[in-house]
Image (cartoon, rainbow, N blue to C red):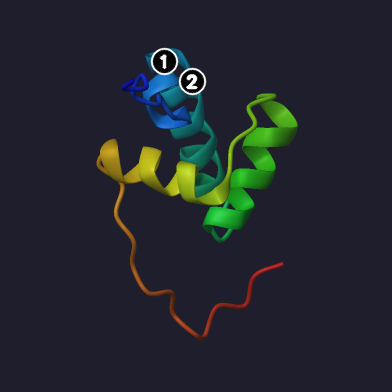
Amino acid sequence: MKSAPRTGVVQKIDDFDVCAIKRAIHSMYEKGERVTLNSILMKVTSELDLTFSRSSLRKILLQNGFRYRKAKTDFLGP
C-alpha cells in the first residue's frame, strides 16, 4: 500500500507568513543588525509565533529570492 506524500512546513506556509518574515528581515537590516539564520529564527519565533526548524527557514528564504553572502570580518556591531 502506497502512503500519501508528506507535506512539510515549506508547503504549508502561506503568503502572509512569508511577507511577515520578509518584513522582519528588512527591519533588522534597516536597524543595522547582522541578519543571520539564527537571528531571523529567533525573531520569527518570538514575534510572529511561527515555529519551524532552521533548515526549513533556509528553504523558505531560498524559495523567495533571498541569497547568502559571506559576512565581513570587520563588523563592529552590538
- Looking at the rendered structure, the number of numbered marks drawn on it comes to 2
Q: Amino acid at mark 2?
A: Asp
- Residue 39 on image: x %, y %: 62, 53
Residue 76 vs residue 1, the one in the foreground: 1
- Residue 24 on image: x %, y %: 54, 35
How many neighbours does mark 1 have within 10 angstroms: few (below 14), some (14-19), or many (20 or more)? few
Q: Give the quadrant of the C terminus.
A: bottom right
- Residue 47 on image: x %, y %: 71, 29
Q: Amino acid at mark 1?
A: Asp
Residue plotted at (44% across, 80% down): 72
Residue at which label 2 appears: 17
- Mark 2 and mark 1 residues within 8 Å of each other at the beta carbon: yes
* Quarter occupied by residue 1: top left
How many neighbours does mark 2 have within 10 angstroms: few (below 14), some (14-19), or many (20 or more)? few
SS for tag 2? helix
Residue plotted at (58% across, 44% down): 53
Q: Is residue 63 above or below residue 2?
A: below
* Quarter occupied by residue 42: top right
Can you tell which mark lies on residue 55? none
**The furthest residue to the bottom:** 74
**The furthest residue to the front:** 1
Marks 2 and 1 sit apart, C-alpha to C-alpha, by: 6 Å
Residue plotted at (65% across, 25% down): 48
Q: Is residue 13 above or below residue 65?
A: above
* Quarter occupied by residue 22: top left
Q: Is residue 30 above or below residue 16?
A: below
Apparent side of residue 40 relative to residue 69 in the rendered image (left or right): right
Q: Is residue 77 above or below residue 13?
A: below
SS for tag 1? loop
Residue at which label 1 appears: 14
Residue 11 vs residue 50, the one in the foreground: 11
Residue 30 vs residue 37, the one in the foreground: 37
